[in-house]
Structure formats: structure tokens, C-alpha cells
Amino acid sequence: MRLIIEARLVDGETDPVEEGDGALAVVERTDLSLAELGLTLAEGRSLLAKVQTELISQQVQRWLAGQTHCESCGAALRHKDSRSTVLRTVYGKVTVKSPRLWSCACQGTARTEQRVVHPLSKALTRRVTPELEYLQAKWAVHLPYRQATNMLKEVLPQDKGISFSSIRHRILDLGKQLDADIERDIAQLPQSVADEQVRECSHVAAVSVDSAWLRNCDPGRDPGRHVNIVAGRATFTDGPPKLYAYVHKEVTSAAARLDQFLSRNGVARDERVTVISDDAGEFGKTVEGSQLARGRILDWFHIAMKFQAAERSVFGSKMIDSMERESVETEIIHAKWLE
Ligand SMILES: [Zn+2]
């Protein structure tokens, strides 16, 4: 059995359907068993790549047909030569022929000579489709770059369309753009108001902030380097939680980052938000100087740890007699539950 998939081009909605001049793909199943049921991954990839090439070629050809005359006087533009333009899409890399034309004589003056115009280059400033950039960015933040590249290559016709380095570049570019956006926001943060004018924010339930050290495990590059990452999570009374994070050494002001995050998530300049952290040092590093995170509490687990340390010091002390020790211990336990 053979399944023949054809491409047919129809111009208008009512135009008659013409017979296609060739098959796009032929799927063959020689025996009658169900062992090979449906399209295989390889057949699917190949089919999608062929459909994409066919569609893009036709779209570009038809669009170019409307670009061959002068916009001002309508005269036909002379053909100079053709170049190849490579477009990267979710369904593969497509190469299209892109003609270069001489600009119209009506556009030139005695001083300026005729120019070369390249309509397709002018129209397609980016050679990568937004969907492919989206997929690359999405999977590269969830997986190591190499694994993201291999995964996309496995499911999409991306044999030579994407590479480890293109994904890495894309992520670094995106990071720079996000950073620039945040810095722009920080420059526009509103002035803070005095403590007495501030009310509790009803929209943000709480923000928790913590930090961690990551060790560079790539033996080829700076093996001993440690990176301190700060990450925070805001919970809202009316929506899903949001996260923010940065590399501590890479930002000029940690407090400004926190304020930008809160401000972007709807906290007004006269509102206060409570931040929970596991250590007083974290407040010093990540929250100190914040105009919006005015409430600060240590999380319950770490408070309990501090009481445990206090209890241990009472037991270990030779300065306290057993009667006194008991009463101090009771006080510590009571104080703990006061929290
Ligand atoms: Zn003209």
C-alpha cells in the first residue's frame, strides 16, 4: 500500500482545484500487518519539512511577483541577479531564491546613480521565525543547551536548522533583553513614601527570598568558580505565584531588583509587602534598601532551629544549676510557641 501526499495550489477560494504536478511524499507499507502503524517520527519530520519548503517557496514567489514594478511610476524594474536567502523555521531550514533589481530610473537624479534593491531582504529583517525562537528559548531554560538542541532535533525537521551554539546565543540575547527591560523599569521606579502613609498590600500575600551557590561543573571553563543565585517567589491572593531571580554579583542593587519585581506585579508605591527568608543575612543581602518590602520575618523552620540552639546552650552550661535550667528551658519552649 502507498499513501501519496500531494501539494495542490489554489489561488482564490472559488477557483477550481487543479491536479498537483507531483507527490510531496509517499508513505509505503508493503505488508498488511499493523507492526508499523501510522507515520513514524522520521516520516513525520520529512513530511513537515517538505510541506514547509513548498508553502514558503510559493508564498515568497507570489509575493515577489508583486515587487517587480516601481512604486511611483509603475515601470518594470530590471533584474540584476539573484541571491539565496535562508529562513529558519520550526519545520526546518528553507532556502529561497531572492532576486535583486535595479531601482527605477524615475528615482535617480543626475547625481545619484541607480541603486540595487533587494525586496525580500528588506521585507524579512529577521531570518528566524518567532515560533522557532520561542521553542529554542523555552526548552533551553528547562534543559541543558545540548539536550534542548537534541530534543528539538528529534521531534522537528531541524537537522541543520539549529545548533547548540545558536540556542546558547539565543538565550544570552534574551537574557540581555530581559536585563535591559528590568534596568529601564528600575530607572522609572516611583519615589517611596513615608512609613506612616503605607498600607499593607492586599494583592501580594507574601514573598519568600532565598539564595544558593552553584558550582561551575564544566571542567574546561573556570572549574572553581561559584555563582551565587538569588531567587524569590511571590504568592498572590488573586493569581498564580511569580518568580524572580538573578546572579548576585551581576546586579548593581538587589533591593531595586526586588522593588522592580513587586512594582511590575502591581504593588503600588504606598503599599508594603512582607518578605520571608531563612536567615537574617539574606535580608541584608537581598532586601535591605527595598522601598516596598517593608515587612520582614524569618521563616518558622529557621526560627525553630534558633530556639533549639538556645536550648542546647542551656543544657551545656555549667553556670546554671539544675533547678534554674529547668525553668529557663520551660521559658524557651513557651517563647517558641508564642511565635
Ligand atoms: Zn519609477
Image (spheres, rainbow, N blue to C red):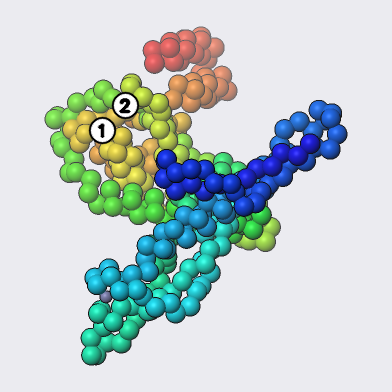
Q: Which residue is mark 1?
A: 267
Which label number is shown at residue 302? none
Looking at the image, the residue that sits furthest to the bottom is 110
Q: Position of residue 68 (x, y in %)?
A: 37, 69
Image position of 96 (left or right of 241): right
Q: Which quadrant does ligand 1 occupy?
A: bottom left
Q: Position of residue 29 (x, y in %)?
A: 80, 37
Position of the N terminus, as image quadrant, is top right
The residue at the point 44 percent across, 44 percent down is 15
Q: Relative to the observer, which residue lies in front, 35 or 238? A: 35
Q: How many marks?
A: 2
Q: Position of residue 62 (x, y in %)?
A: 44, 58
Position of the C terminus, as image quadrant, is top left
The residue at the point 46 percent across, 71 percent down is 99
Q: Relative to the observer, which residue lies in front, 172 or 205? A: 172
Vertical position of residue 277 compared to residue 132: above or below: above
- Tell me which corner region of the image, top left, top right, bottom left or bottom right, holds residue 317: top right
Q: Relative to the observer, which residue lies in front, 45 or 9? A: 9
The answer to whether residue 43 shows anywhere in this view is no
Task: Report, in whole angstroms, how far the alpha carbon at label 1 lies from the one at label 2.
Answer: 8 Å
Q: What element does badge 1 sit on?
A: loop
Q: Are marks 1 and 2 in contact (CB under 8 Å)?
A: yes
Image position of 332 (left or right of 113): right
Q: Position of residue 335 (x, y in %)?
A: 41, 14
Q: Which residue is mark 2?
A: 204
